Image (spheres, rainbow, N blue to C red):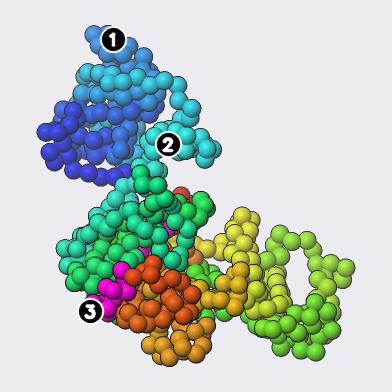
C-alpha cells in the first residue's frame, strides 16, 4: 500500500527551512532548485542517500566530482537517522533506474550543499517496517516508533477523518462544538471512575467516564446539536479493546428519534470515510440484539463470514447421552451447534471408529442425518455441539466461532476478507440485566439514562426485566465502534428507574432530575470511539 501523504507546499517556503517535502517531488519538479529537510533512511554504495520526512522518501545523489570531495565526505560521514538539510536540483533518473516502489521513484535530487542539523546516536532499533520490535521496546521509545511510515500514516489518517467529521457536523449540519468539564463528581452506574484528590481533606473529583450528563444538560439548555472530541476515563484495567483513557466523537441531538440518529451517523461515516478504503454503502443493515445472540452468540457479530449458531435439539430427541440429558433438564436447557467449513483440514483423521467423536457414534442413523442437515455440513466440515443453559451456550459458541475463524486463517484457509468492511446496527437491547453478584437485582445494560422502547414502557412497573431499551450499537467487522440511545427526558420516569428498579441513590443525580423537570426536550445521541480507526489500521497492516 502506498502510504505517502500528499501535501501542498503552498506557503511552506514562508514558514519552513525547506521549499518542498520529500514525498511530493515528481517529474514536474525536474530542473527545479529545492531545499529538503529530513532523516537519513539509508546510505547506499557511497552514491546515494535516501532522505525521509513525514511525506515519504526521496533519493539524494551524492556528487562524485573531485571538486566536491568535501561535500561527498560530509555525506559519507553521516549516520542513519541523522537530521540534515539538502539543497539541490531535481532531475529524472537515468532510464532503467526508476524505482516503482517509491512515489518519487522517477526522480532524484543532485545535492549541491548539505548541512547536518543534528547527529543521531546508535538507536535501540532501526526505523524500518521489516525490522520486528517488541511491544515493550516500541512503547519505551515511542518517539522513535512514531517515525515509522506505518505510524505516521495512522496518525494522519485519524487526523483527516476527524477533520472531515468536524466539517460534516459543524459546516453541513449546524452542530456546536462544546467542551465539557473533565473534573466532575461521582455518579452511579457505568465503569469505575478515577478519583482526583483535592486540597480539601475528604473531598475529591472524579474523571468523567463520558460527557453523558453534560451533553444531556446542554440539550435542556437549548443547544440543540452538540458534539465534541471528548476525552474519557475509565478505571477498569488496560485490555486490547479497553484503555484507561480514550477519545470519542460525542454527539447529542434534540427533537430526534432513533432512526434520525442512525441516519446522521451513516452520513457522517460515509462523508469521512478514507477514499483509499473503497466504496461504502448506506444505509447500514440492522439486526436486533436477540437475532445477533441467536445467530452469532455475541452482540457485536462479525458478519463477513457464516458459521451461524444452529438449534439441533430435534436431532437429540430421546437421546440417552448423559451430559445432554442432564443439560436439557436444567432451566433454559438447549443444544446448539456451529458448522466449521473445512474444519477437519488440520485435525487428525476420523476414518476409524476409534477416532469418531463419542457423541456422533451414539446417535442413530436418522439422528446423524438430521444433525448433518440442520448444520448444513459437507464432507470435511467440523461440527461443534454444546448443551446447557441458553445464556451459557450462546456466548460459548460465539467465542468458539471467532476462534475457529482465526485458527483456519492461520492454516491459510480464507475466512474473513480484510479488505471488506461490514457495518451493522444492533438494536433492541434489553434495558436491564441481572447483576452478576445478585441475580435477583437488576442493573442497566448500558447506562441508567436510556429510554425504554415505547411499546415496552408499561412493563417498567410490572416486568422490568422484559423491557427493551432504545439503545443502538454500531458494529464494524465484529468490533463495536459506537453506541448510543434515545434518552429519558421525563423526570418522574428517570426517578422511578433510579430509585425503584436500580436501587440507586437519586440524590446523586438531583442536578439531572431537576434539569429534566425544567422543560427537557426529547433527545438522543451516540459516541463513536477509536475502534473504527483500529479496524482501519488492522486492514492496512494485512
Quadrant hosting residue 99: top left
Query: Label 2 neighbourhood size at 10 Å, few (<14), some (14-19), many (20+)?
Result: few
Q: Check residue 519 in the rendering and tell me which mark sits there, or answer none.
A: 3
How far apart are the alpha carbons under marks 1 and 3? 81 Å
Query: Label 3 neighbourhood size at 10 Å, few (<14), some (14-19), many (20+)?
Result: some
Determine if residue 423 is in view: no
Location of residue 91 in the rendering, given as x and y in whole percent from the top left corner: 22, 30
**Mark 2 — residue?**
142
Q: Image height check: is 227 above or below 157?
A: below
**Mark 1 — residue?**
69
Tally of numbered tags: 3
* Comes first in the chain, label 1 or label 2: 1
Residue 528 among magenta residues:
yes
Quadrant hosting residue 391: bottom right
How far apart are the alpha carbons under marks 1 and 2? 38 Å
Determine the residue positioned at 52% across, 63% down.
416
Most foreground residue, 408 or 532 = 532
In magenta, the rendered stretch is 511-532
Determine the residue positioned at 21% across, 60% down.
177
Location of residue 181 in the rendering, given as x and y in whole percent from the top left corner: 29, 55
How far apart are the alpha carbons under marks 2 and 3? 50 Å
* Comes first in the chain, label 2 or label 3: 2
Amino acid at each position: 500500500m502506498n502510504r505517502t501523504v500528499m501535501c501542498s507546499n503552498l506557503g511552506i517556503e514562508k514558514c519552513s527551512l525547506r521549499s518542498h517535502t520529500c514525498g511530493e517531488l515528481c517529474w514536474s519538479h525536474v530542473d527545479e532548485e529545492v531545499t529538503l529537510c529530513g532523516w537519513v533512511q539509508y546510505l547506499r554504495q557511497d552514491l546515494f542517500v535516501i532522505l525521509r520526512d513525514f511525506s515519504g522518501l526521496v533519493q539524494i545523489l551524492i556528487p562524485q566530482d573531485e571538486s566536491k570531495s568535501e561535500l561527498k565526505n560530509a555525506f559519507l560521514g553521516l549516520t542513519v537517522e541523522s537530521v540534515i538539510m539538502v539543497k539541490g536540483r531535481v532531475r529524472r533518473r537515468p532510464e532503467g533506474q526508476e524505482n516503482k516502489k517509491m512515489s518519487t521513484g522517477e526522480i532524484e535530487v543532485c545535492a549541491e550543499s548539505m548541512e547536518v542539523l543534528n547527529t543521531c546516536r546508535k538507536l535501540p532499533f532501526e526505523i524500518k517496517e521489516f525490522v520486528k520490535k517488541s511491544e515493550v521496546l516500541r512503547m519505551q521509545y515511542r518517539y522513535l516508533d512514531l517515525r515509522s511510515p506505518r505510524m505516521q500514516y495512522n496518525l494522519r489518517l485519524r487526523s483527516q477523518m476527524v477533520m472531515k467529521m468536524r466539517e460534516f457536523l459543524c459546516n453541513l449540519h449546524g452542530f456546536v462544538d462544546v467542551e465539557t468539564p473533565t473534573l466532575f463528581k461521582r455518579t452511579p452506574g457505568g465503569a469505575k471512575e478515577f478519583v482526583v484528590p483535592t486540597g480539601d481533606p475528604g473531598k475529591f473529583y472524579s474523571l468523567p467516564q463520558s460527557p453523558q450528563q453534560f451533553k444531556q444538560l446542554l440539550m435542556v439548555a437549548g443547544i440543540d446539536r452538540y458534539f465534541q472530541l471528548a476525552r474519557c476515563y475509565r478505571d477498569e484495567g488496560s485490555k486490547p479493546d479497553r484503555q484507561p483513557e480514550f477519545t470519542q466523537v460525542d454527539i447529542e441531538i434534540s427533537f430526534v428519534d432513533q432512526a434520525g440518529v442512525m441516519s446522521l451517523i451513516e452520513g457522517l461515516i460515509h462523508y469521512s470515510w478514507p477514499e483509499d478504503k473503497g466504496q461504502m454503502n448506506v444505509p447500514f443493515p440492522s439486526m436486533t440484539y436477540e437475532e445477533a445472540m441467536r445467530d452469532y452468540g455475541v452482540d457485536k457479530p462479525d458478519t463477513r463470514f457464516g458459521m451461524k449458531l444452529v438449534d439441533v435439539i430435534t436431532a437429540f430427541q430421546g437421546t440417552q447421552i448423559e451430559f445432554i440429558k442432564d443439560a436439557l433438564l436444567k432451566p433454559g436447557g438447549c443444544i446448539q451447534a456451529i458448522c466449521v467449513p473445512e474444519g477437519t483440514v488440520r485435525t487428525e483423521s476420523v476414518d476409524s471408529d476409534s477416532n469418531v467423536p463419542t457423541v456422533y457414534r451414539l446417535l442413530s442413523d436418522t439422528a446423524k442425518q438430521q444433525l448433518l442437515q440442520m448444520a448444513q455440513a459437507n464432507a470435511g466440515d467440523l461440527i461443534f455441539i454444546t448443551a446447557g443453559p441458553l445464556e451459557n451456550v450462546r456466548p460459548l459458541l460465539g467465542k468458539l466461532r471467532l476462534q475457529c475463524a482465526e485458527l483456519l486463517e492461520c492454516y491459510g484457509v480464507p475466512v474473513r476478507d480484510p479488505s471488506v468492511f461490514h457495518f451493522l446496527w444492533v438494536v433492541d437491547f434489553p434495558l436491564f440485566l441481572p447483576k452478576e453478584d445478585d441475580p435477583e437485582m437488576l442493573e442497566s445494560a448500558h447506562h441508567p439514562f436510556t429510554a425504554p422502547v415505547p411499546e415496552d414502557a408499561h412493563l417498567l412497573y410490572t416486568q422490568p426485566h422484559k423491557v427493551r431499551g432504545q439503545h443502538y450499537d454500531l458494529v464494524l467487522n465484529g468490533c463495536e465502534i459506537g453506541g448510543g440511545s434515545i434518552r429519558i427526558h421525563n423526570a418522574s420516569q428517570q426517578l422511578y428507574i433510579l430509585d425503584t428498579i436500580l436501587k440507586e441513590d437519586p440524590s446523586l443525580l438531583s442536578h439531572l432530575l431537576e434539569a429534566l423537570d425544567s422543560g427537557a426536550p426529547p433527545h438522543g445521541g451516540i459516541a463513536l470511539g477509536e475502534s473504527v480507526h483500529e479496524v482501519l489500521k488492522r486492514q492496512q497492516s494485512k
